[in-house]
Amino acid sequence: MILTSAVFIPLLPVLLGQYHPTPEVLAMAKTLLYWSIPGLLLFWPRSNTLPSTLRAANDTLYPSVVSLAVLWIVTIGLGYVLAIPCKLGLPGVWIAMWASWAIRCIIFSVRFGSEKWLYRALTSR
């Protein structure tokens, strides 16, 4: 992820230039990409690999319910509130994405650390 970001950032103007964007769109795309990279590095890997790990250990209901709840409440709900009533627009949606990744990270780390999922993994064999 770090290597991909390190390669992608310097190439950003060239890659975005392929779409012939207006200056406003180019500025917004750069801003959003710079905003998304730290979240992708800090939260996204763990928030997406831990639920897969739990599902592989036969703990399927918990990750599914948490993922759906966080999607609807945080990503969509908070994204709407930040984008429209708070007038942050598209950056507000990305802030909500960061928040959802961070919340999923915390919830799934706690679940994994509690080892409650081990019971399901052991009883399924």
Image (spheres, helix red, strand yellow):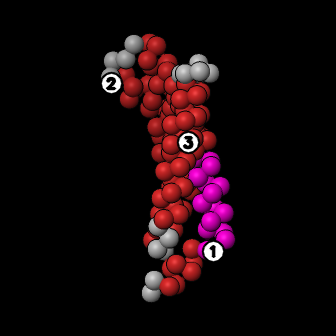
Q: Which residue is mark 3?
A: 73
Viewer-side residue, 81 vs 20: 81
Q: Quadrant of the C terminus?
A: bottom left
Viewer-side residue, 65 vs 23: 65
Q: Do the residues bearing badges 3 and 1 touch, measured as CB atoms within 8 Å?
A: no
- On screen, 99 above or below 12? below
Task: Point out which mark residue 18 bears.
Answer: 2
Q: Nearer the viewer, mark 3 or mark 1?
A: 3
Q: Which residue is mark 1?
A: 115
Task: Point out which mark residue 105 bears.
Answer: none
Where residue 29 appears, as percent x and y from the top left, is 47, 25
Q: Is residue 2 visible?
A: no
Is 107 positioned to the left or the right of 24 in the image? right
Is 9 positioned to the left or the right of 42 in the image? left
- On screen, 11 above or below 117? above
Which residues make up the magenta segment? 101-116
Q: Residues within 10 Å of mark 3 (few under 14, many from 20)?
A: few
Q: Do the residues bearing badges 2 and 1 touch, measured as CB atoms within 8 Å?
A: no
Which is nearer the N-term, disc 3 or disc 1?
3
- Specify whether residue 108 is painted magenta: yes
- On screen, 73 above or below 92? below
Q: Nearer the viewer, mark 2 or mark 3?
A: 3
